[in-house]
Structures are given as C-alpha cells and as structure tokens.
Amino acid sequence: MSAEPRLSYVLVTDTYETIRGVVRALAAQTRAGELEVVLVGPAAQPLEVPAEEVAAFAGHRVVAVERILPLEKARAAGVRAATAPLVNVGETHAFHEPGFSAAVMDAFDGPWAAVVPGFDNGNPGSALSWANFTLDYSRWSFVLPPGEIDFLPAYNTTFRREFLLGLGEVLDAAFGVGHDIGADLRREGRMTWFEPNACIAHVNVCLLRHAIRERFLLARSQAAHRAEAWSRARRAVYVCGSPLIPAVLAARVWGGLTALRRERDLSFWTYAAMLNGLLVRMAGEITGFVAGATDRQHQAAEEYEVHKLRFITPGSRAAEPRPVDDAGRERHVRSG
C-alpha cells in the first residue's frame, strides 16, 4: 500500500449504503493502494464506513457537512479535504472498471490538467437507458479514440488538485449544473486528455416517467442558473432560439453515436427515446429561461443524481466488468 495517495476520489452521499457498490468497485482497482477515498455526508447522520471495505486504500476520509444539497458545495468540501495531487469527483451510480485508476494515473504523465474517462452504459438492458446514455455521455464513449479534447464533464473527470484549489471561491460552484469547468481550464490555457481505457460504467434512469421528469428538471435547473442574472431581453432571445436546441444537441452527440453504432445494435426505440429526450430538454430549458426554478425544483433534480439506482428496471444492469490486460488497462471488447 502506498504511503501517500496519488488519486483522491470524492463521493457525496446521504448514507454509506447508497455508495457501497462504488466503494467496492474502487477497492477492486488494480492500483487501489494508491487511492484515497473522501466520503462527504450529512453531519446529522454520520456515515458508518465498514473498516474492511476501505482497507485496500492508501487512506480514507469522512467529511461532515450541514447538508449534502446543493451537491456542488458538498463536492467542493470534499475536494478541499483531499490530499492526493489528482482528484476525481464521482457519482453514486458510476462504477469504475478495474483498470480505471491505472489508466488515469498513467495518462497524467503527460501535460494534462484533466483526464476524461471513457464511458460505457452501466445498465445496457434497456432502450431508454441507451437513449439517455447516448444523449449524455456518447461524446466520451469508450469506443472513441484517445486524444486531446476541449469539452468535458465535471463529474468523473480527474483533475490536478492544484488547478481545482486555484479556482478559489469558484470551486463552490465548479461541480454544479450551471457551471462549465472546461471554460475555467481553457481560460488558464490548460489541456484536457480523453483516455478511453479509463472506463466507467454509468447507470442511467430507465423508467419512463422518471426519465422524462429527470431530464426536464435538470434542463430547467441548468437554464435557470444560466439566466439568473440575464435581462428580460436576453431571456427572450434564448426562448426564441430554443427550437434549435434539439438540432444543436444532436450535432454534439453525432460522433459518439456513430461510433457506438459500429459496436452495438441500437433499437428503433432507442432513437425514439432520444428524440423524446431532446424535446423534453427543450421544454425544460424554455421553462427555466422564462420562469426560472425554485429551490425545491433544483433539489428534486439533484435527488435523481444521488439516488439514480432507484429508477432503473430490474435486470438492466451490466453483469460483468470489462476484462483487464496485464498492464492493468481495460481491453476494448465488442458487445451487443
């Protein structure tokens, strides 16, 4: 076991049970002894962490906050408590393949300030899950080639800790839905690397009513945050341009979708659900631009983020992790 961790993994949760599966996936890493796990939970209900489940790590920390919502502030508290030079803010429903940490740490031998992992669908037994995965993560699908990129997700990306701490007070908003951390990187002239061999299986909502509600609430919350300080005239301009949202979003995921289609047969229902998701996103953004969002609506969107595993169909989860080669890297495999 390493005396000093090289990568800190930050995870915000309400109870330990909510993230038990994620912690076990991290403990199964080929280089688990170089990881520090930072668990952020509510002070009123302290997290009870079984010692045997964190024994494989270089260390673990429990950070108590007054409340875990809004998530961005709780995540920032976890980042500030981390001690490793690399920091990853994870999710309760994103599970790392065994070679994830090795591939990420090896990638940081380059000049990168951030390394984005390759994503795979963690519950591939549902057309609706494939639709949500494609809309949200196909531009970083593990089937795409490695290389330098500009746009990145804040969650599950690994950053150099000095960059995150250098954000100062901005860190409190950096992992929120209304902030683009990629813009912070570009503003400082920092570079981002996409490493598909650092693979994460991301679980997606696949119960129709909840999939629609989650996408609408998230879009409304994002738009409300963006438009908070806008004038009425600027809001009106964005509302008038809202019919273009589905086309713009479809263009963004086209490359990832094309690559996925070479690897997997996506059904008609997947494409139908994608179209529905784009229209729901448009409706949510229009509502957010016009009416904003209440604290309760922001919180409802974040509740899905914490408890996404409650909203999947039984049997839709992937059963086996991706194979790992002798160097600790996932081998890309084709599956239907």
Image (cartoon, rainbow, N blue to C red):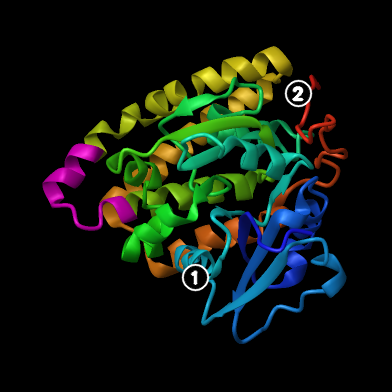
Cα–Cα span, label 1 and label 2: 35 Å
Residue 228 falls left or right of residue 43: left
**Furthest residue toward top:** 262
Find disc 2 in the rendering and name its residue.
Answer: 332
Which amino acid is tagged 1?
Ala
Residue at 76% from the left image edge and 59% from the top image edge? 23
Mark closer to the chain start, 1 or 2:
1
Q: Which residues are magenta?
A: 225-238
Find disc 1 in the rendering and name its residue.
Answer: 77
Residue at 79% from the left image edge and 42% from the top image edge? 98
Q: Kindly check if marks 1 and 2 are in contact, taking CB atoms under 8 A apart as contact.
A: no
Q: Position of residue 91 (x, y in %)?
A: 62, 54
Q: Position of residue 128 (x, y in %)?
A: 67, 35
Residue 71 falls left or right of residue 271: left
In the figure, 55 relative to 329: above or below? below
Q: Quadrant of residue 234?
A: top left
Magenta span main SS: helix
Does the magenta portion include 226? yes
**Furthest residue toward front:** 3
Does the magenta portion include 268? no
Query: Mark 1 falls on what kind of element?
Result: helix
Residue 110 falls left or right of residue 230: right
Q: Quadrant of residue 283?
A: top left
Query: Mark 2 falls on what kind of element?
Result: loop
Which amino acid is tagged 2?
His
